[in-house]
C-alpha cells in the first residue's frame, strides 16, 4: 500500500489492483490542505483510496478531496473511510462504509460533515 501525502494533485495509473492511503496534510507543518485532487486511471486494475481519520484534522473541516475516475472496463475506484475496530473508531461516507466510482468520468467530492461522517457525492 502506498501513501499520497502533502500534495494538491496526483494522477494514478493502475498496473493491477492497487491501494493508497490519502493524507491531505502539509508535510512540513502537518496542517490540513485546503484541497486535494486525485485522478485515477483504472484501465490496469481497480483502485482503493483510504481516507484518513476525521479526528486527525483537529477540528479543521475545510478540506475538500476530489476523486476523478477514468475507469477501465470493469475496474472501480473504491473510496473507504477510516475504521479502527479495536479502538472503536468508525468513520463513514454519508452513512455508508464506502463510495464506489464505476463509470468513466465520474467524480466524487468529499468534505467532512461531522466528527465521524464524510459528506460524499458522486456525479457524472
Image (cartoon, rainbow, N blue to C red):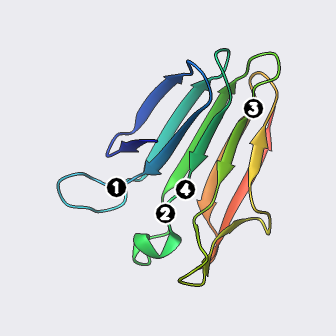
Which residue in the protein does label 1 denote? Answer: 25
Q: Tag 2 or tag 3, which sits nearer the N-term?
A: 2
Q: Which mark is residue 62?
A: 2
Left or right for 36, reference 93:
left
Circles 4, 1 touching at the beta carbon (< 8 Å): no
Q: Nearer the viewer, residue 33 or 47?
A: 47
| Residue depicted at 37% across the width and 53% down the height | 33
State the SS at label 1.
Answer: loop
Q: Position of residue 27 (x, y in %)?
A: 23, 51
Quadrant of the drawing holding the C terminus? top right
Q: Position of residue 15 (x, y in %)?
A: 55, 18
| Residue depicted at 58% across the width and 44% down the height | 49
**Residues under labels 2 and 1: Cα distance?**
12 Å
Of the residues tagged 1 and 3, which is closer to the observer?
A: 3
Q: Tag 4 or tag 2, which sits nearer the N-term?
A: 4
**Residues under labels 2 and 4: Cα distance?**
15 Å
**Residues under labels 3 and 2: Cα distance?**
27 Å
Of the residues tagged 3 and 2, which is closer to the observer?
A: 3
Q: Tag 3 or tag 1, which sits nearer the N-term?
A: 1
Q: Which mark is residue 76?
A: 3
| Residue depicted at 73% across the width and 22% down the height | 71
Left or right for 32, reference 123:
left
Amino acid at each position: 500500500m502506498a501513501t499520497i501525502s502533502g500534495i494538491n494533485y496526483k494522477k494514478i495509473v493502475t498496473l493491477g489492483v492497487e491501494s493508497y492511503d490519502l493524507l491531505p496534510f502539509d508535510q512540513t507543518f502537518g496542517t490540513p490542505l485546503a484541497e486535494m485532487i486525485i485522478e485515477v486511471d483504472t484501465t490496469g486494475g481497480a483502485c482503493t483510496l483510504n481516507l484518513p481519520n476525521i479526528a486527525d484534522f483537529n477540528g479543521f473541516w475545510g478540506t475538500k478531496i476530489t476523486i476523478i475516475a477514468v475507469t477501465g472496463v470493469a475496474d472501480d475506484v473504491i473510496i473507504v473511510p477510516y475504521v479502527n475496530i479495536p479502538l472503536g473508531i468508525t468513520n463513514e461516507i454519508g452513512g455508508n462504509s464506502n463510495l464506489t466510482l464505476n463509470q468513466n468520468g465520474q467524480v466524487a467530492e468529499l468534505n467532512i460533515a461531522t466528527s465521524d461522517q464524510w459528506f460524499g457525492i458522486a456525479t457524472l
